[in-house]
Amino acid sequence: MECEIRADDLRHLPMAVETELYRIAQEALNNMLKHSAATRVTITIRYRHGTLAIQIKDNGKGFDPASVAGKGGMGLASIQERVERLGGTCQIISRLGRGTTVQVTLPRIESHSEETG
Ligand SMILES: Nc1ncnc2c1ncn2[C@@H]1O[C@H](COP(=O)(O)OP(=O)(O)O)[C@@H](O)[C@H]1O
Ligand SMILES: [Mg+2]
């Protein structure tokens, strides 16, 4: 699996947000490995002016998000839940044969200073 990661400096991200972000990425990457048959994944993390945006994009087989809505899968639902708890938004962009992109945006994150660690 080819993997490209582009990330901003995340050192000032609050620990709680970092943990949530890790879980979100874990769920998305799990799905990619389990369902997508992708050969390539690109992870982009932007953290600028208090807004964090993570995008996990695979080139796999894709799916119809409408057809899985409310079907009881735990993964996508748990991503949605975590994002809502943090006051953010989540988009699942996918189409059969066109790969999948999971895009999460978390606004208004207060960065902590270097001193407080
Ligand atoms: N990256 C992906 N590529 C292809 N299909 C996906 C991807 N992510 C999710 N899916 C589809 O969405 C469904 C729901 O995902 P999820 O809520 O995590 O439940 P689960 O993984 O337990 O089936 C999956 O069963 C799969 O059909
Ligand atoms: Mg899953």
Image: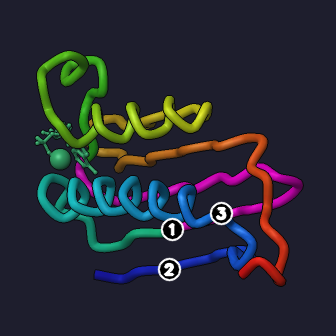
Queried whether the magenta region covers residue 115, the answer comes back as: no
- Magenta region: 43-61
| Other residues around mark 2 within 10 Å, as few (<14) / some (14–19) / many (≥20) | few
Query: Residue beneath label 1, please?
Result: 43
1 or 2: tag closer to the N-terminus = 2
As helix, strand or loop, the secondary structure at mark 2 comes to strand
> Quadrant of the rendered structure where residue 108 is?
top right
Q: Position of residue 94 (x, y in %)?
A: 37, 37
Kindly identify the residue that appears in the image at 77 percent across and 49 percent down. Answer: 51
Query: Residue beneath label 2, please?
Result: 4
As helix, strand or loop, the secondary structure at mark 1 comes to strand
- Residue type beneath disc 1: Ile
Kindly identify the residue that appears in the image at 84 percent across and 73 percent down. Answer: 113
Q: Position of residue 68 (x, y in %)?
A: 19, 24
Q: Position of residue 63 (x, y in %)?
A: 24, 36
Quadrant where the C terminus sits is bottom right
Residue 14 numbered mark, or none: 3
Query: In the figure, 113 relative to 18: above or below?
Result: below
Q: Which label sits in the foreground, 3 or 2?
A: 3
Left or right placement of residue 45 versus residue 67 in this view: right
* Between 106 and 5, the one nearer to me in the picture: 106
